[in-house]
């Protein structure tokens, strides 16, 4: 399933956009007290978690591919920065679990409101707390992107700078 690694750079932009928009809508719903904004935020959170899981999966595939190159002794044009990759992976995992936990919390809050019919009293403190947690999640998202950007723009991961060196294999075959 390593062919999925090629989709990681494309997929990562979905959770970024969805989680930032979600947090904005969650905070807006607290200020404006509009249920339709809160429901839209809930939908974006669900879609964001799904896209984050996809990004995490494809990123793990890409890291696995790089580790196999390293273990096999395949020459790469530039050294693979495994330490930076691990930091990126750690932040991505934290971010995904954070927003997944937030989604579970939102479902539980929704079920409590539906079951107990205590919406006016409960929303006074529940939704502002959820909005604050969403903004904290944006910090985790920022750190994930910061480390991912460092991998691409400073270390060359995902570019032509880091790939198996096939030119030396061709030269050895010609000799």
Image (spheres, helix red, strand yellow):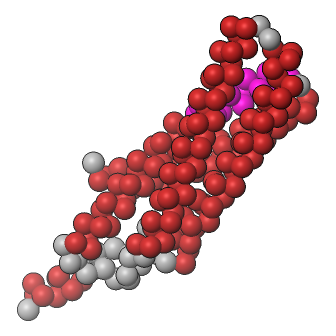
From the viewer's perspective, is residue 13 above or below residue 166?
Answer: above
Q: Nearer the viewer, residue 44 or 141?
A: 141
* Residue furthest to the right: 32
Specify whether residue 117 is in view: yes
Query: Which residues are the magenta region?
Result: 34-47
Residue 89 at what x, y percent from top left? 47, 59
From the viewer's perspective, is residue 95 above or below residue 105?
Answer: below
| Residue at image location 56% in from the left, 67% down from the top | 147
Left or right relative to 61: residue 139: right
| Residue at image location 38% in from the left, 76% down from the top | 80
Left or right relative to 119: residue 8: left
From the viewer's perspective, is residue 113 above or below residue 156?
Answer: above
In the rendered picture of this protein, how many numbered marks are placed on residues? 0
- The verdict on residue 42 being magenta is yes
| Residue at image location 30% in from the left, 67% down from the top | 67
Specify whether residue 5 is in view: no
Residue 128 at what x, y percent from top left? 82, 34
Snapshot quadrant of residue 79: bottom left
From the viewer's perspective, is residue 67 above or below residue 118?
Answer: below
- The verdict on residue 139 being magenta is no
| Residue at image location 61% in from the left, 32% down from the top | 103
Left or right relative to 121: residue 3: left
> Can you say which quadrant of the picture contains the C terminus?
bottom left
Secondary structure that dominates the magenta span: helix
Residue 56 at what x, y percent from top left? 46, 49
């Amino acid at each position: 399933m390593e062919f999925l690694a090629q989709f990681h750079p494309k997929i990562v932009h979905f959770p970024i956009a969805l989680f930032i928009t979600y947090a904005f809508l969650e905070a807006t719903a607290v200020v404006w007290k509009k249920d339709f904004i809160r429901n839209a935020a809930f939908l974006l959170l669900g879609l964001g978690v799904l896209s984050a899981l996809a990004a995490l999966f494809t990123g793990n595939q890409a890291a696995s591919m790089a580790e196999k190159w390293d273990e096999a002794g395949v020459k790469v044009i530039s050294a693979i920065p495994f330490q930076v990759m691990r930091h990126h992976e750690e932040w991505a995992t934290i971010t995904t679990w954070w927003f997944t936990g937030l989604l579970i919390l939102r479902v539980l809050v929704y079920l409590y409101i539906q079951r107990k019919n205590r919406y006016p009293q409960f929303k006074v403190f529940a939704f502002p707390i959820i909005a604050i947690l969403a903004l904290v999640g944006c910090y985790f998202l920022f750190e994930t992107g910061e480390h991912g950007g460092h991998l691409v723009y400073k270390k060359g991961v995902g570019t032509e700078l880091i790939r198996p060196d096939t030119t030396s294999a061709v030269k050895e075959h010609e000799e």
